[in-house]
Image (tube, rainbow, N blue to C red):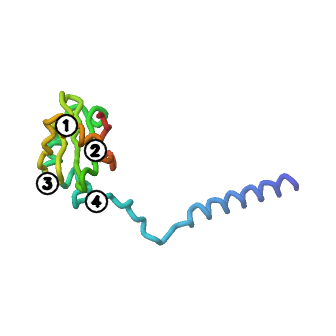
Amino acid sequence: MMNVLLKIKSAFFLILVLFVLTNCKSEDPVEEPEKDVVCGVSDPVNNLRWLNKLYKEFYGGPLINGIVLYQYNDSQVIEVQSGVSSSTNIHQYFCDGVKLDLLDPVKFKEFRDNRIEIKVLYGTKLW
């Protein structure tokens, strides 16, 4: 008799657990996480034509390439970092795709000293 009661309790517990698991549904819609707006668009790597073109030129994937967003002198600046690039001062762009003029070592040092990293938009930060 005790064995039968134990089996009934076990079966009841199992049915209760299955009922709870299958009936706990939320009617609330699942919201997608908000994407940050960069240069006036969400998903800038795909939605900024000039940046998407540079992104498509990457060779080797996200471990040896990166796209990093900085704040510099009240502007958003996107730095395109590639493992095959030999220089670090010619890959900075304003939101409209215009390159920053950082060929002068003094200007480049000022940029590096005064920029604020916001986030990595793609891949791995290299510099």
Q: Which SS class for mark 1?
A: helix
**Amino acid on which the number 1 mark rests in the picture:** Val
Mark toward the viewer: 1 or 4: 1
Cα distance in 3D space between marks 3 and 2: 16 Å
Which quarter of the rendering shows the C terminus? top left
Cα distance in 3D space between marks 2 and 4: 14 Å
The tag earlier along the polypeptide, 3 or 2, is 2
Q: Dot 3: within a 10 Å radius of its alpha carbon, few (fewer than 14), some, or many (20 or more) residues? A: few
The tag earlier along the polypeptide, 2 or 4, is 4
100 or 42, which lies in front?
100
Residue under the point 17% across and 41% down: 56
Cα distance in 3D space between marks 1 and 4: 31 Å
**Amino acid on which the number 4 mark rests in the picture:** Val
Q: Is residue 35 left or right of residue 89?
A: right
Q: Which SS class for mark 3?
A: loop
Q: Which quarter of the picture shows residue 47?
A: bottom left
11 or 77, which lies in front?
77
Q: Residue 33 carries which label?
A: none
The tag earlier along the polypeptide, 1 or 4, is 4
Cα distance in 3D space between marks 4 and 3: 14 Å
Circle 1 sits on which residue?
106
Residue under the point 72% across and 57% down: 11
The tag earlier along the polypeptide, 4 or 3, is 4
Circle 3 sits on which residue?
96
Q: Which SS class for mark 4?
A: strand
Q: Is residue 35 left or right of residue 41?
A: right
Circle 2 sits on which residue?
68
Q: Residue 37 carries which label?
A: 4
In the rendered image, the residue lying farthest to the right is: 1
Q: Dot 1: within a 10 Å radius of its alpha carbon, few (fewer than 14), some, or many (20 or more) residues? A: few
